[in-house]
Image (cartoon, rainbow, N blue to C red):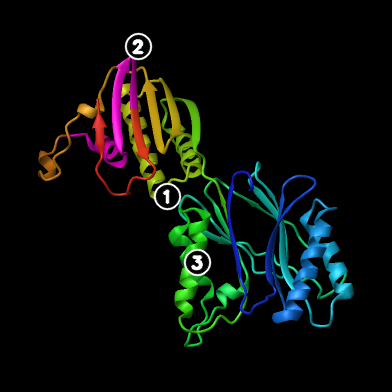
Amino acid sequence: EIANFEVAAVTIPAMEVGGDFYDFITLPHGGHGLVIADVAGKSIPAALFMALSRMIIRASAAHQSLATEVLRNANNMIASDATAGMFVTLLFGVLDGEALTLKYANAGHPTPLIFKSMDCRYAEERACGIALGAKEGVSYEEQTIKFMPGDVAVFYTDGVTEAMNTRGELFGMQRLIGAVSKTCQSPAEEIMARILEEVSAFRGDREQNDDLTLVVLKASPRVEEHSLISVHSRDEEIPRVSEELERVMSGAGFAGKQILDMQLAVEEAFINIIRHGYHGAYGAILIAIDFQEGRLTVTIEDDAPPFDPTRFQEPDFSADLEKRPIGGLGIHLMRSLSDEMRYEFETGKNRLKLIKIKDRPLIGAHQEAG
């Protein structure tokens, strides 16, 4: 187990023995080493070279704290003894569960795919060095992946993207990206299972022609978060509030649309206080953002005159534009974009609560309570 990460991994050889492998190494200086590799060739020679490569990487990692040095030393050892034409593409990284980082170096391996938690947006890492064993004296570059809670990283061998169907077509990168995008809000095991299902369905009756290895890392979404912001009744404070709301909600694993909905709802509440509570005068606003047990509650507190938006009548959108009463659209948005809206007036302060439930369908009924 790796603190603050979900991990799912699998190797499926094309023959009884294969040359792909993955490994997780507990490092003496702290952290965990992640390895994914693909040895050139198949069958017994590849399996033997794989075992040698794995042993050398483990030995090198026992004495080095930098991924670049682990690969440099391993490459020199492998290159000096490798049979002509034998090499291994390999990625080695140092995973820090507290900092939520992976510092890695790449020796000719397919680069990992990164998916951001808020919108399942995909970003491909691009650094790629020379395969281990191909040439002595090679240096490698260090790259860093900084995870936010809920972010997903997918490491794979070319047995995934080069899986072939009965028409000779390749599974390809876009199908892999699509498979992850559909499930990146799910646990790591489900993401991996979806990729394997889609590869198998694509291949159909055609035999597996190459080893296949997958490693899926997912930074565990936060189970609880609390934030308190003290701001003034000025429009220029809105971006600060929106940024903090995005930070908390993305860390908790909310979908992108849920985050945007709440940002807009809170912005409307903020503007209502500025315009109609303080009437443009200076005033203090306290915003508490709390996430626990799957519920996000944004409490907006001010000491303007009492006003209960939950009792405000919904605008009649069926009426002609010139016959509609002025105002009310902002309150309608607050009500419709949150899952619950509550209000109380205590100790001389307005307290408006806007609530979003993480696992509620994106389109559904909204509730309010006084």
| First to last magenta residue range | 326-352
Question: With respect to residue 106, does 243 lie above or below?
Answer: above
Nearest to N terminus: mark 1 or mark 3: 3
Front residue of 171 and 190: 190
Residue furthest out toward the right: 80
* 149 inside magenta stretch: no
Mark 3 residue element:
helix
Q: What x and y, as percent, mark residue 116?
A: 52, 53
Nearest to N terminus: mark 2 or mark 1: 1
Q: Quadrant of residue 346?
A: top left
Q: What x and y, as percent, mark residue 108?
A: 72, 70
Label 3 Cα neighbours within 10 Å, binned few <14 / some 14-19 / many ≥20: many
Residue furthest out toward the bottom: 167
- Which residue is label 2 attached to? 347
Amino acid carrying label 1: it is: Gly
Question: With respect to residue 94, does 252 lie above or below?
Answer: above
Viewer-nearest of discs 1 and 3:
3
Q: What's the CA distance linking mark 1 and mark 3?
A: 22 Å
Q: What x and y, as percent, mark residue 131?
A: 76, 72
Mark 2 residue element:
loop
Q: Which mark is residue 256?
A: 1
Amino acid carrying label 2: it is: Thr
Front residue of 225 and 233: 225
Label 3 near label 1: C-beta < 8 Å? no
- Which residue is label 3 attached to? 195
